[in-house]
């Protein structure tokens, strides 16, 4: 069974925590160390960002991390070689997150093949048109037993959400707001209503809430309204500040208590 499906099938009532980091930042050789540190620290799933020069969905923190990674020489091929080096030690799901231009240039099928070779369980492409997913990506993902995770936002129509739910497998990435990534202090009434509206739809796929989670209030809100939370910008900031995955994780855990 795909590791993503296995994770959600076996979690019971436990709420999950997934962390995002950008491969190649702050140093190009940190990828394996970050992954293994997070796994030892009890993180359930890891999103590994593929740096891109024009990341439209990302806020300034992740945009800056991507710029640093590209300057450091990070490429998709180098990332795959780093993932393959730690493949036999990784037991939790790894999800690549990258933009369509990079993956299309690399080649869709070649990308899927390398994902399997390197122990990747799925991928997220924020700017992937749904028609392209259905016609080009999904057949390949199904063939290679990979999960292409789709995003929904407060502006996504109920019709589109149900269509996504029907045609995807693994989990749905529930973006907390229609804005770019970045830490928030709290989720306002509008976001709470959005969470409640999606809950009332009784979707087949589990959901993970991301964008803006950086403290206890936002973490608890995400956990109350989904299978778990995804944290990106806060961890990316701490990783750059410390240049040490273990210290960054410890600092994040402390931040999530306040």
Image (cartoon, rainbow, N blue to C red):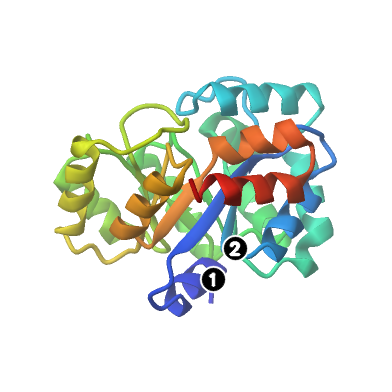
Residue for badge 1: 2
Badge 1 crowding class, 10 Å Cα cut-off, few under 14, some 14 to 19, many 20 or more, is some
3D distance between C-alphas at marks 1 and 2? 8 Å
Instruction: Give the residue displayed 63% in from the left and 22% down from the top.
Output: 64
Mark 1 or 2 closer to N-term?
1
Give the structural element (helix, strand or loop) at label 1: loop
Which residue is tagged 2?
93
Q: Residue at x 47, y 63 (%)?
A: 16
Residue 231 visible in this rendered orientation of the protein: yes
| Secondary structure found at label 2 | loop
Label 1 close to label 2 by CB (< 8 Å): yes
Q: Position of residue 126 (x, y in %)?
A: 45, 37
Q: Is residue 85 left or right of residue 252?
A: right
Q: Please say whether residue 96 is visible from this viewpoint.
A: no
Q: Estimate the x, y position of residue 238 in percent, counting from the top left.
A: 66, 37
Q: Is residue 146 left or right of residue 135?
A: right
How many badges with numbers are in the image?
Answer: 2
Q: Residue furthest front?
A: 258
At 51% from the left and 48% from the top, the residue drawn is 256
Give me the disc on residue 44.
none
């Amino acid at each position: 069974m795909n590791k993503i499906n296995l994770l959600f099938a076996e979690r019971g009532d436990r709420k999950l925590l997934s962390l995002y980091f950008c491969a190649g930042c702050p140093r190009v050789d940190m990828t394996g160390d970050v992954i293994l540190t997070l796994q030892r620290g009890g993180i359930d799933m890891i999103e590994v960002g593929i740096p891109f020069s024009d990341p439209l969905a990302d806020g300034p923190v992740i945009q800056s991390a991507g710029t640093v990674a590209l300057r450091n020489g990070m490429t998709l091929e180098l990332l795959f070689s780093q993932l393959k080096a730690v493949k036999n030690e990784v037991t939790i799901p790894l999800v690549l997150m990258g933009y369509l231009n990079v993956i299309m240039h690399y080649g869709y099928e070649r990308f899927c093949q390398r994902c399997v070779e390197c122990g990747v369980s799925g991928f997220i492409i924020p700017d992937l048109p749904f028609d392209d997913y259905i016609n080009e990506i999904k057949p390949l993902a199904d063939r290679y037993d990979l999960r292409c995770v789709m995003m929904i936002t407060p502006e996504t129509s109920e019709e589109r959400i149900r269509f996504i739910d029907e045609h995807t497998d693994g989990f749905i990435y529930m973006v907390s707001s229609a804005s770019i990534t970045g830490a928030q202090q709290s989720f306002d009434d509008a976001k709470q209503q959005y969470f409640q509206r999606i809950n009332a739809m009784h979707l087949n796929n589990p959901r993970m809430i991301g964008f803006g989670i950086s403290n206890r209030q936002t973490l608890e809100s995400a956990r109350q309204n989904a299978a778990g939370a995804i944290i990106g910008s806060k961890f990316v900031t701490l990783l750059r500040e410390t240049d040490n995955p273990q210290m960054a994780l410890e600092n994040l855990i402390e931040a999530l208590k306040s």
